[in-house]
């Protein structure tokens, strides 16, 4: 006698597969929406006790750099460069963390972070 049901256990395999595909498509839409929302966000980080401030967008582009007058010392450019780099790296790290947190809410912690 031939088996029926297409080889899926329980007989309802196709329905389960369709539900799984719908859930995956919904999750993909949610991730795309979250990604677009994150691109519109900005985060600001500081270094040197706030004398250097860097703002980055969700697209990981620097949108603003603010320097306090006391940090501008023509005889010590290296310190200024280090402070700018530190603030930039911190702002980018915060944006990565925010993106990962948003994606984890959608995926239930199964990964799926943004390709930043």
Image: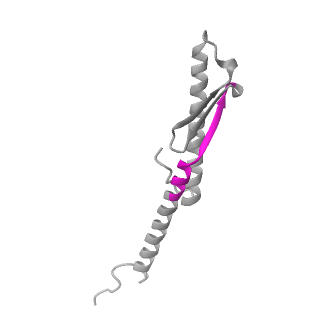
Q: How many marks?
A: 0
- The residue depicted at 38 percent of the width and 78 percent of the height is 8
* Relative to 1, residue 40 above or below: above
Res. 92 image quadrant: top right
* Relative to 6, residue 57 above or below: above
Task: Tell me the quarter of the image containing the N terminus.
Answer: bottom left
The range drawn in magenta is 33-48
Relative side of 64 to 3, left or right:
right
Q: Residue 111: x and y, percent?
A: 51, 53
* Relative to 61, residue 99 above or below: below
Q: Residue 4: x and y, percent?
A: 33, 86
Q: Residue 72: x and y, percent?
A: 64, 17
Q: Is residue 41 magenta?
A: yes
- The residue depicted at 70 percent of the width and 28 percent of the height is 50
100 or 109, nearer to the observer: 100
1 or 91, nearer to the observer: 91
Relative side of 17 to 49, left or right:
left
Q: Is residue 9 visible?
A: no
Res. 56 image quadrant: top right
- The residue depicted at 48 percent of the width and 44 percent of the height is 116
């Amino acid at each position: 006698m031939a088996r029926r049901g297409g080889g899926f256990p329980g007989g309802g395999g196709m329905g389960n597969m369709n539900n799984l595909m719908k859930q995956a498509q919904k999750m993909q839409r949610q991730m795309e929406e979250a990604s677009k929302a994150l691109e519109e966000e900005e985060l600001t980080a500081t270094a040197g006790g706030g004398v250097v401030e860097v703002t980055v967008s969700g697209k990981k582009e620097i949108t603003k750099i603010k320097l306090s007058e006391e940090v501008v010392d023509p005889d010590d450019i290296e310190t200024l460069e280090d402070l700018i780099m530190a603030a930039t790296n911190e702002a980018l790290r915060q944006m990565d963390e925010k993106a990962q947190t948003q994606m984890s809410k959608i995926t239930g912690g199964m990964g799926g972070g943004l390709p930043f």
